[in-house]
Image: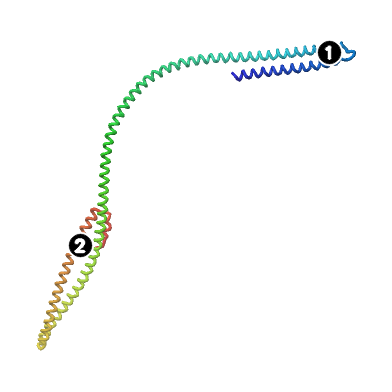
Amino acid sequence: MMAARDSSRIMLLEEEVRSLSEELGQCQADKEFVWSLWKRLQVANPDLTQAVSLVVEREKWKAEAKDRKVLEILQAKDYKIQELDQRVTGQQQEITNLVQRKIAVDEDRGLVKKELAALRRKLGNKSQELKDVKEERRRREEALEEEKEGLESCCSALRGDLEQAQRQERRHGEERAAADAKVKEMEGDLSDAQRQVADLQGQCSSLADLLSSRQKEVAQRDQHVTQLGRELQEVQALYRQSSEHAVEQAQLIQQLEGLNLDTQTVLRNQEEAHTADTTSYQKVTNYTVYYHPIHLHYNTQSPL
């Protein structure tokens, strides 16, 4: 609206400027005409008729120019009136549209009022529901607070149990570490025992070979004694020599028998020691299998 007023004012100002410019041009032309006429009248015998004719023609020209100007103004007014009529028609159409829109807005306002009343009723219902929900929420919060306290107590108990379990786990870990160290120590002892058993077996084999050799020697001695008996019967002259030789042989046999007894005693002691080592090894193996099954493959493949 302000832009339209500013545009109208600008048009009016432009019109006034144009009118003033035309008036200024007319005044300038009148001035020049009067000046030229005054010059004509300043001669010795001025031609008044010509001067009057010029004045009449000037006035006639001015009247015609004025009429043209009035005609242009009237035409401009007519164009302006037509433009205003069109604007009035457009504004009337806009007013009609605005009235229709107002009617539609009034109808919408009525619908909105109805909807607003319904929304207010719903708001009242929702307010009551909100109060009920808040009350229910308060009761639930109280129940949750009680449940939270119970859960905190339970968590405290569980934390205590967890700490106790962790202490037990640490103690079991220490016991497992000690048991592992003990097992490693026993495995070392077992390896030493196995080496000792192998050495004893080697010694037993050596003693068995020695015993076999001594038994062969004894058999050879027996055969020699028999041969000496036959020679004793044949050679009575050599009785004393043979007797001495027999005594020496008897002493040697006695020594061999003592050596045999010693050998049997050593073998029996070695067998008992081997039996005791085997029993100890079996116990260690059972302990390893029961407590540390991971060493089973190593123990079962260890050489005896």
Q: Which residue is mark 1?
A: 54
Q: Is residue 215 above or below residue 14?
A: below
Residue 247 appears left or right of 36: left
Residue 177 percent coordinates (x, y): 27, 53
Circle 1: element type: helix
Q: Which mark is residue 140?
A: none
Per the model, the C-alpha gap separating discs 2 and 1 is 168 Å
Residue 70 percent coordinates (x, y): 73, 12
Q: Which residue is mark 2?
A: 277
Q: Tell me where residue 51 sits by quadrant.
A: top right
Residue 175 percent coordinates (x, y): 25, 52
* Mark 1 residue crowding within 10 angstroms, few (<14) / some (14–19) / many (20+): some
Q: Is residue 251 above or below residue 189?
A: below
Q: Tell me where residue 156 sits by quadrant.
A: top left
Badge 2 or badge 1: first in the primary sequence: 1
Residue 101 percent coordinates (x, y): 52, 16
Amino acid identity at mark 1: Leu
Residue 97 versus residue 152: which sits nearer the camera?
Answer: 152
Q: Name which residue lies at 18% across and 64% down.
A: 273
Q: Tell me where residue 21 sits by quadrant.
A: top right
* Mark 2 residue crowding within 10 angstroms, few (<14) / some (14–19) / many (20+): some
Circle 2: element type: helix
